[in-house]
């Protein structure tokens, strides 16, 4: 693993990692909200035997800076395209979770020539009224009570019942990890931006590359029916993981790795 960073065109520092960087196809893993490259490292160890791997913290995440520009989906897409250009990568597979799936989908919409195959996890065709209110409630909790209170509010929504039951002894450590890896001001900017994103369905209708949509049957933020609709719009294969919540790669790592590897190869 090699750790590095680069400056975007507006001089914002973006942190990234490369794993197994040889003459192989490239896979970029994109974080969900409140995640960092740390969350993808176990998967990078599995995928690096077949692919060159890029992990990166999007603007306002982890070790990347917020910068001075107002956060938007287009800005995230521009950052990713500049990262690929910086690394001299002309085409890549994108594997995105939640917010990362949003960015992946938007890059494929805006720059289809850059995307080989697309894996979209925990995202639906439309933003439900419930999800919009949940994001607003997270913003309110963060502003009034801080990162620790937000982490406790987030956990039961982004993980399924089975995972939480199996990991009940380390829930406190999970909360501390969220607090440690996030910056309050940067996360406020991110949450404010998210509800202004266009619907994923409006982007999916122009997707032409092979795509895979993965959803969890216990996801409280993404309706399985809406995930299937997104797959239909972009003519993608759809897989629903039974008993799994929003954080698919963490909750079902072996099934996730097997399914994605099979699709990409």
Image (spheres, rainbow, N blue to C red):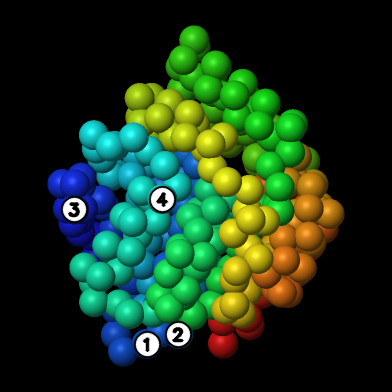
Residue at (33%, 80%) from the top-left corner?
A: 90
Q: Nearest the camera: 23 or 223?
A: 223
Q: Which mark is residue 9?
A: 3
Picture quadrant of residue 111 = bottom left
How many residues crowd around disc 4 within 10 Å: few (fewer than 14), some, or many (20 or more)? some
Asked if marks 1 and 2 touch (Cβ < 8 Å), the reply is yes
* Label 1 sits on residue: 24
* Label 4 sits on residue: 74
Percent x, y of residue 149? 54, 18
Asked if marks 2 and 3 touch (Cβ < 8 Å), the reply is no
Q: CA distance from mark 2 to mark 4?
A: 30 Å
Residue at (68%, 42%) from the top-left corner?
A: 127
Q: Nearer the viewer, mark 1 or mark 4?
A: 4
Q: Earlier in the sequence, mark 3 or mark 4?
A: 3
Q: Earlier in the sequence, mark 1 or mark 4?
A: 1
Q: Is residue 58 left or right of residue 14?
A: right
How many residues crowd around disc 3 within 10 Å: few (fewer than 14), some, or many (20 or more)? few
Q: Which mark is residue 50?
A: 2
Q: Is residue 84 left or right of residue 127?
A: left
Q: Nearer the viewer, mark 1 or mark 3?
A: 3
Asked if marks 2 and 4 touch (Cβ < 8 Å), the reply is no
Residue at (61%, 21%) from the top-left corner?
A: 137
């Amino acid at each position: 693993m090699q750790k590095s960073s680069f400056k975007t065109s507006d001089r914002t520092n973006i942190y990234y990692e490369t794993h197994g960087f040889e003459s192989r196809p490239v896979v970029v893993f994109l974080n969900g909200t409140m995640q960092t490259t740390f969350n993808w490292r176990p998967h990078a160890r599995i995928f690096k035997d077949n692919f060159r791997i890029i992990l990166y913290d999007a603007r306002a995440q982890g070790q990347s800076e917020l910068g001075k520009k107002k956060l938007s989906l287009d800005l995230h897409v521009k950052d990713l395209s500049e990262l690929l250009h910086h690394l001299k990568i002309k085409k890549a597979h994108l594997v995105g979770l939640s917010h990362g799936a949003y960015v992946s989908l938007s890059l494929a919409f805006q720059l289809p020539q850059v995307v080989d195959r697309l894996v979209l996890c925990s995202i639906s065709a439309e933003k439900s009224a419930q999800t919009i209110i949940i994001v607003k409630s997270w913003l309110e909790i963060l502003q009034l009570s801080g990162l620790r209170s937000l982490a406790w509010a987030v956990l039961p929504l982004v993980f399924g019942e089975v995972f939480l039951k199996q990991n009940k002894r380390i829930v406190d450590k999970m909360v501390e990890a969220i607090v440690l890896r996030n910056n309050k001001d940067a996360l406020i900017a991110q949450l404010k931006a998210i509800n202004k994103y266009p619907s994923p369905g409006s982007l999916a209708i122009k997707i032409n590359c092979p795509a895979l949509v993965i959803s969890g049957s216990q996801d409280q933020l993404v309706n399985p029916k809406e995930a299937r609709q997104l797959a239909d719009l972009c003519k993608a294969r759809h897989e629903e993981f039974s008993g799994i919540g929003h954080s698919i790669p963490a909750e079902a790592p072996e099934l996730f790795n097997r399914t994605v590897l099979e699709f990409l190869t």
